[in-house]
Amino acid sequence: MNIPTVIGQKIEQTQAFLENGTRVPLTHVYVGENSVSQIKTVEKDGYSAVQVAFGERNKIAKPLAGHLKKAGLKKSPRFLREIRVGEVEGIGIGAAILPEEVLKPGDKIDVVGISKGKGFAGGVKRWGFRGGPKTHGQSDRHRAPGSIGQGTTPGRVYKGKKMAGRMGNEQVTIKNLEVIDIKDGEVIIKGLVPGPKGGVIVITKIGENKNFKPLFTVVEETVEVSSEEVAEVPIETSIETNQAAKASVETEKAVAADTKEVMPDNAEGIKEEK
């Protein structure tokens, strides 16, 4: 399949060790439900692209329901993303996109996601400004942005000036991450990706890492024992052992009964002496 991109949903972030002992951060992304919902060609649309559907939801608008009916999808997807491809030959509408067909361990990838929203933030948090002086009587300039431009020339603030404002909740691309493993519809990525848990992630393959090192795994060794090596216990010995055990139990019961019978006589004798 010529599709280099899959859509996923961020599950969690963890950490693990590689075979060389290096500890690395990992991100688990679920990519098990990708399917083709529309194909765009150069003759009809002016460019080649594939619309990929991912996820599931209950309520859906009627125009979108008609669009998905043409694709023959049984479930209503939650997300739709368009992916540019070089050729659309061999790709059918409604076809499932398996992660194993697009990615493999050792692939270099670019990850696109929507970052967490931080709300309105100042210049120190949003851009890393150092703030004003902390001494010489400066009591209200510790987190101030400072000068935002010149005077008469140009007489205005330039566009794109780094100032306080809304932070986060925007598209972020993290480049040159690495696929560590793929199993059960999950892609395990070496590195951290933008967005909260449950956020949509777009993964695009850009190359391969020739010096790929997989995760460290503990291999459990199983020792096979032949029937000849197993020592068989004679039946007579086991019977004698059981009989000896029963005899010792009966002896203990008899001793306990004798002790019980003697105790009351001793107790009455002690009372009479008193």
Image: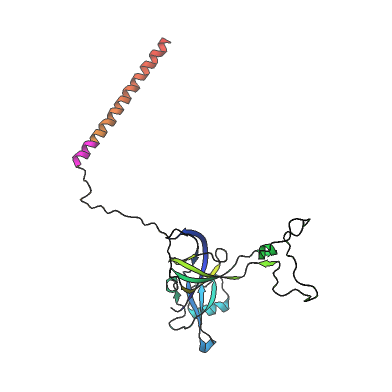
Q: Is residue 114 above or below residue 137?
A: below
Would residue 27 appear left or right of 167 to someone viewing this image? Answer: left
Image coords of residue 131 (percent x, y): 71, 61
Residue at image position (49%, 79%) is 71
Image coords of residue 10 (percent x, y): 53, 65
Location of the C terminus by quadrant is top left
Image coords of residue 158 (percent x, y): 73, 75
Location of the N terminus by quadrant is bottom left
- What secondary structure prevails in the magenta region? helix
Q: Quadrant of residue 142?
A: bottom right
Q: Is residue 242 above or below residue 152?
A: above
Residue at image position (50%, 68%) is 177
* Residue at the extreme front of the image, as rendered: 136
Residue at image position (26%, 33%) is 246
| 95 in the magenta segment | no
Q: Is residue 149 above or below residue 23?
A: below
Q: Quadrant of residue 214?
A: bottom left
Residue at image position (54%, 75%) is 80
- For residue 109, say whether it is visible: yes
Q: Is residue 209 above or below residue 41?
A: above
| 237 in the magenta segment | yes
Residue closer to the observer: 87 or 80: 87
Would residue 139 appear left or right of 248 to someone viewing this image? Answer: right
How many marks do you count on the picture?
Answer: 0
Q: Which region of the structure is painted magenta?
A: 235-241
* Residue at the extreme right of the image, as rendered: 152
- For residue 73, say whether it is visible: no
